[in-house]
Amino acid sequence: MKLLLLGALIGLLIAFPPLLALVLAAVVTVLPKPVLMAFGLGLAVRTSLPGLQRWTR
């Protein structure tokens, strides 16, 4: 699923080059905010942690 979303994002960036500026602006806005960074990293890592799935069921 992550690879599908990444492929869709890359495809959109190739098809619509001005979107790159919007994506970069969003990344630059989020980087200085540690709470948002931690939340985003937690969402990205959560699916790859096998032990977490048995705790949430």
Image: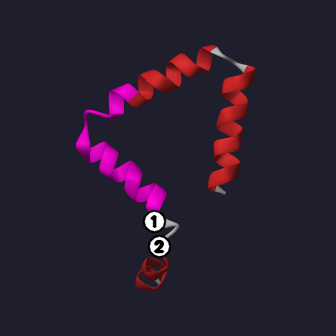
Q: Does residue 56 appear to the left or right of 32 in the view shown?
A: right
Label 1 packing within 10 angstroms: few (<14), some (14-19), many (20+)? few
Q: Quadrant of the N terminus?
A: bottom right
Where in the figure is residue 7, as x and y percent of width and height?
Answer: 70, 42
What's under tag 2, amino acid-wise? Leu
Where in the figure is residue 15, as x and y percent of width and height?
Answer: 75, 22
What's under tag 1, amino acid-wise? Arg
Q: Which residues are magenta?
A: 28-46
Q: How many marks?
A: 2
Quarter of the image holding residue 30? top left
Where in the figure is residue 54, as x and y percent of width and height?
Answer: 46, 85
Q: Residue furthest top?
A: 18
Relative vertical location of residue 35 with respect to residue 10 in this rendering, above or below: below
Q: Which residue is mark 2?
A: 49
Q: Does residue 45 appear to the left or right of 3 in the view shown?
A: left
Q: Which label was assigned to residue 46?
A: 1
Q: Is residue 15 magenta?
A: no
24, 57: nearer the viewer: 24
6, 53: nearer the viewer: 6
Residue found 51% across the figure and 20% down from its top: 22
Mark 1 and mark 2: Cα distance apart in space: 6 Å
Residue found 47% across the figure and 24% down from its top: 24
Residue found 43% across the figure and 21% down from its top: 25
Q: Secondary structure at mark 1?
A: helix
The reply to whether dot 1 and dot 2 touch (C-beta < 8 Å) is yes
Residue found 25% across the figure and 46% down from its top: 35
